[in-house]
């Protein structure tokens, strides 16, 4: 009887010890799937902005050759950025993320603080460099923003992560921007754009 009781307890203990192991396995599977889902490589082919699906922006081949806005280039993928070397010699990187039927790339743009603006950080008025008409106003007193004098909503800046989340008013989805600020009067913003497979014209 004693041996039977010991064996029963041992079997029960063994089953209990298996439960944390199974939980651990499940957690590892979820983590593995999540990492894999986030690190899907950029898919070669012809890609266009979703608002102009017949105009190819990126045309990448599997051998590392391609074109960006029609300019021949070579491209490499590190899982987070596309590193492009144009035929002209220019080199730059584009942050990206793949989804089921589309991709998102973050295009960089440079801004300078508006003359007379005394704010610090991302707060204040910004205008595009190099002839760009793009503008941003970030109001820290109520966390409201105004983009290009037209689009508005609320924003949340995270200086440690280097991100600005825009919550648009008027039917647009949220947008996650990345930013780099060198000094107080210069701002580089990476803005997300959705890509779809280029539609062939009839």
Image (cartoon, rainbow, N blue to C red):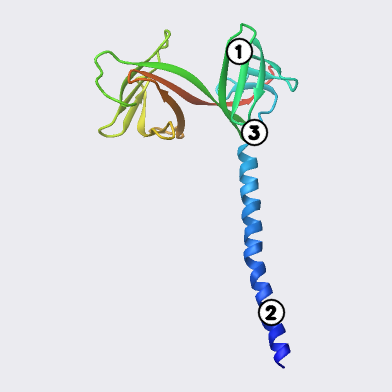
Could you give the CA–CA distance between mark 2 and mark 3, rounded to whole angstroms?
52 Å
Determine which residue is flagged by label 2: 10
Up the image or down, 23 lies above or below 148; here it is below
Answer with mark 1 or mark 3, whichever residue precedes in sequence: 1
Callout 2–callout 3 Cβ contact below 8 Å = no
Label 2, residues with CA under 10 Å away: few <14, some 14-19, many ≥20: few
Up the image or down, 119 lies above or below 2; here it is above
Answer with mark 1 or mark 2, whichever residue precedes in sequence: 2
Image quarter where the N terminus lies is bottom right
The residue at the point 27 percent across, 13 percent down is 115
The residue at the point 73 percent across, 88 percent down is 4
Image quarter where the C terminus lies is top right
Determine which residue is flagged by label 1: 69
Dot 3 falls on a residue whose secondary structure is loop
- Label disc, if present, on residue 101 of the rendered structure: 3
The residue at the point 65 percent across, 76 percent down is 13
**Residue 40's spot in the image, x, y percent?**
65, 35
Dot 1 falls on a residue whose secondary structure is loop
The quadrant in which residue 136 appears is top left
Question: Which residue occupies the foreground of this view, 159 or 99?
Answer: 159
Hey, which residue is sitting farthest bottom in the picture?
Answer: 1
Question: Which residue occupies the foreground of this view, 78 or 165?
Answer: 78
Tell me if residue 42 can be seen.
yes
Label 3, residues with CA under 10 Å away: few <14, some 14-19, many ≥20: few
**Residue 29's spot in the image, x, y percent?**
66, 52
């Amino acid at each position: 009887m004693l041996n039977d009781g010991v064996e029963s307890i041992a079997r029960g203990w063994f089953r209990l010890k298996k439960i944390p192991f199974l939980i651990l396995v499940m957690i590892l599977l979820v983590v593995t799937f999540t990492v894999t889902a986030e690190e899907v490589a950029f898919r070669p082919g012809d890609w266009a902005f979703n608002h102009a699906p017949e105009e190819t922006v990126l045309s990448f081949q599997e051998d590392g050759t391609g074109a960006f806005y029609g300019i021949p280039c070579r491209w490499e993928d590190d899982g987070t950025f596309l590193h492009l070397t144009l035929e002209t010699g220019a080199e730059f990187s584009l942050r990206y993320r793949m989804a089921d039927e589309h991709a998102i790339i973050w295009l960089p743009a440079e801004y300078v603080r508006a003359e007379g603006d005394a704010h610090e950080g991302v707060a204040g008025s910004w205008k595009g460099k190099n002839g760009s008409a793009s503008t941003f106003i970030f109001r820290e007193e109520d966390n409201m923003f105004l983009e290009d004098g037209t689009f508005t909503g609320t924003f949340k800046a995270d200086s440690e992560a280097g991100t600005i989340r825009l919550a648009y008013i008027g039917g647009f989805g949220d947008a996650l921007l990345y930013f780099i600020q060198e000094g107080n009067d210069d701002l580089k913003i990476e803005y997300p754009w959705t890509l779809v497979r280029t539609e062939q014209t009839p």
